[in-house]
Amino acid sequence: MINKDRLLDTFLNLAQINSPSKSERPIAEYVCPLLQDIGFRIVEDGAADKIGGNCGNLVATLEGTASSGVRLFFNAHMDTVEPTDGIQIIVEDNVVRTDGTTVLGADCKSGIAVILEAARTAVEQGVPFKSLQIVFSVAEEIGLLGARNMDISLLAADVGYVFDTERPAGQIVTAAPTHENLLVKIYGRASHAGIRPEDGVSAIVAASRAIATMKLGRIDEETTANVGVINGGRARNIVPDEVEIRAEARSRNESKLQEQVRHMVETFKRAASEIGAEAEVNVEREYHSYRWTSDDMPVKLARKAAECIGIEPILAEAGGGSDANIFNHAGIPAVVIGVGYEYPHSRSERLLIDEFVQSAEFALALIRCSTMA
């Protein structure tokens, strides 16, 4: 059985530590002694230098006593969205939340706590397993930067579980999309807006016309698109000659994604050309999709673990990415597991304690079942 009080204390301690992306060092300093006490050997990779952060990814390894079974790895990320500085935590009615002035950071500090408690309990109870690696990554919230710059050669695992999504506890995310980023620069011609506006070509007008006619939002059940950031203009009385736009498209279907990206690129270029401006569009892939079926190892083992603790395994397909996308693309099968929080990235974020405990029981069951795979 999981030690509920210890699990909750670990999360509350983690939640008090401010750890925005690229500033995860205080979390690393908290978890490393705990991992070492359990018996893990820890390596920190060189991702910090690559991304300009103060901490790299932590890869902790513990060899088990079983001679057979699958080699597991568990993952959660150490950074959170902001704000968490000055957090005030309230625990009542079996729920953990803040006073509403900050986010809670359950995404993904609840995942870290679940992994630590499951590993500690497995060792205390002498649960046999072949090997267990724990990957605590950095800068996940700003484009999976830690995982994308991770030294994958440090991983020696057959299957992985990323504890980084909302309730219900034990939800198994079997598919996630490919993500393309679009950086658009529209160049017009500056002119005095009051004296000679007809001599100008407004980059803002070109951008506005493009966005107004673009297919955005929910495109279909597998595909989404969004224009998220617009920067441009120098003064109220100058016809703007340059605008920068950051947009994205995601889909679990590659052909649908490419069609949506083509539509967005062509729409920007056509709208600019129609008024004498020019659009320059750069498309960059942030991460690749993955898809697993009920017959694939990551899902089969997760379903078995769920059944072992008496919960109904729920399979889901995601609209967002996680470190699992990076691991799968690197050839290490992984799925995402629900941890028991809800409303992440908002000041309403909260952690349901019963489901949080159930998530830790699920992680422990994965370790137990790893010798049966």
Image (spheres, helix red, strand yellow):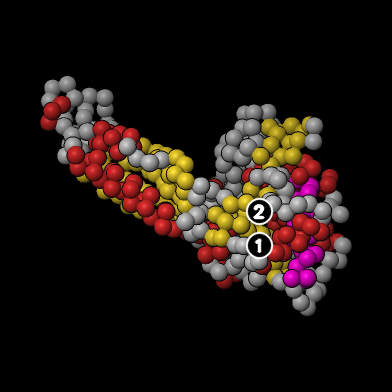
Where residue 152 sits, quadrant-wise, is: bottom right
Q: Do the numbered discs 2 and 1 sit on residues whose CB atoms are within 8 Å?
A: yes
Where residue 124 sits, quadrant-wise, is: bottom right
Say which of 86 and 154 sits in front: 154
Say which of 114 and 34 sits in front: 114
Residue 118 sits above or below residue 269 on the image: below
Is residue 235 in view?
yes
Question: Magenta part of the protein: which range?
Answer: 356-373
Position of residue 307 measured from the top left corner of the image (x, y, whole percent): 79, 57
Q: Residue at (81%, 59%) from the top-left corner?
A: 308
Q: Residue at (16%, 32%) from the top-left corner?
A: 200
Q: Where is the C terminus found, in terms of image quarters?
A: bottom right
Q: Is residue 39 magenta?
A: no
What amino acid is labelled 1 in the image?
A: Ser
Residue furthest bottom as drawn: 67
Dominant secondary structure of the residues highlighted in magenta in the image: helix
What amino acid is labelled 2 in the image?
A: Leu
**Residue located beneath label 2 in the image:** 315
Q: Where is the N terminus found, in terms of image quarters?
A: bottom right
Where residue 89 sits, quadrant-wise, is: top right
For this view, does 118 lie left or right of residue 271? right
**Residue located beneath label 1 in the image:** 294
Q: Which tag, 2 or 1, sits closer to the chain's start?
A: 1
Q: Residue at (30%, 34%) from the top-left corner?
A: 208
Q: Residue at (83%, 47%) from the top-left corner?
A: 4
- Check disc 2: other Cα within 10 Å, few if <14, some if 14-19, many if 20+: some
Position of residue 337 measured from the top left corner of the image (x, y, whole percent): 67, 53
For this view, does 117 lie left or right of residue 251? right
Residue 297 sits above or below residue 309 on the image: below
Task: Say the numbered circle drawn on residue 26.
Answer: none
For this view, does 7 lie left or right of residue 189? right
